[in-house]
Amino acid sequence: MIVEDKLPVRLDRFLKRCYPLITQGVIQTLLRSKKVKVNSVRIKEASLRLNHGDKVEVFANLDEYSQETEAINPLAKSLSQKLLGEYKIFENDNFLVINKPAKLATQGGTKINICIDDGLKYLNSLGSSLKLVHRLDKETSGLILIAKGYDAAAKLSYGFREKKIYKTYLALVKGTPKQKQGIIKIEDEITKYKLLEYDIIKDVSLIEFKPITGKEHQIRRHALEIGTYILGDKKYGPNQKDKYMMLHSAGITIDKEIFGSEYSFNIPLPKYFMDDNKKPATYIDSNFDKLSSALKKNIQRRKLAKKNEEQDSQDNQQ
């Protein structure tokens, strides 16, 4: 591993960042047993300062040190099958791309019965080495990356840290921003946004958000900053009865610097974004050219399905 940091960084913190599943105690053990080299020299000091361009090598099977001591959730087997089946949209030697449904948590916590991490632990108990490198809120749907092995996890973590992985979100919000596009900046949090369409009757907008930084709840809070709130957001919006929060991770692109080739993925909006008559399903047609190709295909597919259903109904009546 080559240190990319512009400023000096402690060796133990660098290792923890590259291998998030190992504990500080494991790092100390590796150092004491002389299993870590920096620039071809074995190092025992966790506090050693690494500089830009330093080469770090670890001579150990880190999978043996993973934090897998928790009992496997009994629901994990079923979820693992979905992760490798209906939820999976892409897989290669380095990573998986999953289309996470809303209401499925990424990681465990209070009142969380099952999460993606549980499914990965089950698969890892069978010999896989799958690792989360980022997360989505439980209520947010859409694309999420899962690394295959420590090297891939380190590369993807580097990609997120150095802003070499680009994410696009779509949200239905109440109201509309004064400016049709712009940059939202609050302290060190930055998000680009663009108004795709506004339904004046329902006072609802479809907005594209592109976060430059990746803080918790960033898009949800930044929606407030432009005078709107995401429909169904019970934390940052007023009292709402919507079953779903209308925030979707619709696109993700991995810069070619990470794996040698660029990867780009897009996923259509979930059905509930357009099926609820409280939502602006009608105005999507009025601004068709501004929508992504994935969204267009999704809309066309649903129109065709509806047309076929109507035709079948007419045939049955004859």
Image (cartoon, grey):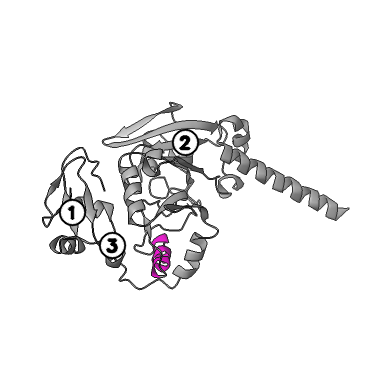
Q: Which residues are magenta?
A: 113-125
Which residue type does callout 3 highlight? Answer: Leu
- The residue that label 1 is drawn on is 37
Q: Position of residue 238 (x, y in %)?
A: 42, 46
- Residue found farthest to the right: 318
Q: Secondary structure at mark 2?
A: strand
- The residue that label 3 is drawn on is 62
Q: Residue visible at 32% across and 33% down? A: 185
The part of the image, by quadrant, that contains residue 158 is top left
| Residue 223 visible in this rendered orientation of the protein | no
Q: Are marks 1 and 3 in contact (CB under 8 Å)?
A: no
Task: Judge whether residue 61 is colored magenta.
Answer: no
Please tell me which of labels 1 and 3 falls first in the chain: 1
CA separation in Å, label 1 and label 3? 15 Å
Which residue type does callout 1 highlight? Answer: Lys
Which one is nearer the viewer's eye here, 51 or 146?
Answer: 51
Q: Secondary structure at mark 3?
A: helix
Q: Position of residue 12 (x, y in %)?
A: 17, 54
Which residue type does callout 2 highlight? Answer: Glu
How busy is the neighbourhood of tag 3: few (under 14 within 10 Å), some, or many (20 plus)?
some
Which one is nearer the viewer's eye here, 70 or 38?
Answer: 38
Q: Nearer the viewer, mark 1 or mark 2?
A: 1
Q: Secondary structure at mark 1?
A: strand
- The residue that label 2 is drawn on is 208
- Is 101 placed left or right of 39 in the picture? right
